Amino acid sequence: MMNRAEEDYIKTIYELTVERKQSLIKSNELSESFGFTDQSVNEMIKRLESKNLVSFYPYKGLALTNKGKQIAIRMIRSHRIWEVFLTEKLGFSWESVHNDAELLEHATSDELLERLYDFLDKPKYCQHGNPIPDLKGHMSPSSNLSLADFEKNDLIKLTRVLDTKELLVFLNDKNIKLYDILLIVEKDDFNQTITIENTAKQDIISFQTAKMLFGEKV
């Protein structure tokens, strides 16, 4: 049996691997993602390794075993399907849906999850633009290019945002939504800011914020 903390680790390792297109993840990347100490992360890695869920390679990093990948895919699939249901059918806002989806993903049977998926007409993406994996882990494509990767005068379609409450509240305040078309008006490397235009309204965002927003050129 796995507890919730172990499942969260497995899920995060998988997400970091896919998002960064890396075969191995360093333990300090997990520490940064969770905000935990290196010691507590290393203890969890040892526990997961003892359960044959991760393989650790000294001085290189760690990767999920096939068993670990299957669990991670199922957790991510469950989480994102619940996010779609909670926002589309129950009216949850995209910044408030995460915690409830987090609870539900751990307590959902396979049969319930697949019925929910069919009920929602088999969505390909969650409300934050993250692809929903199928049972084998195959996902629709998603952009890994952040707004910070584009240049002045580029026209960008916003296709994915990080599921961080503070970021989502900020985007609400600026009236920026998924699939909006954004023009990069100015990129100030010295001050680390980007000026974007969205339906004739301009906003200045930091490079830090820009790195949490992903899109594709149009």
Image (cartoon, grey):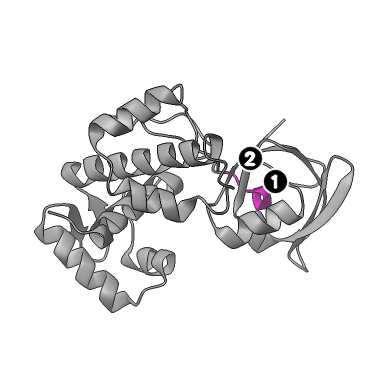
- The residue located at (62%, 58%) in the rendering is 167
In percent of width and height, residue 109 lies at: 24, 38
Q: Callout 1: few (<14), some (14-19), or many (20+) C-alpha neighbours within 10 Å?
A: some
Coordinates of residue 51 in the picture (x, y in percent) = 11, 56
Choose between 176 and 61: the one closer to the eye: 176
Figure quadrant of residue 188? bottom right
- Amino acid type, label 1: Phe
Q: Which residue is mark 1?
A: 150
Judge the density around disc 2: few (<14), some (14-19), many (≥20) Cα neighbours within 10 Å: many
Q: Is residue 147 magenta?
A: yes
Q: Amino acid at mark 2?
A: Gly
Residue 21 rendering spot, x and y as whole percentages: 41, 45
Q: Which residues are magenta?
A: 145-150
The residue shown at (75%, 47%) is 151
* Camera sees residue 146: yes
Circle 2 sits on which residue? 215
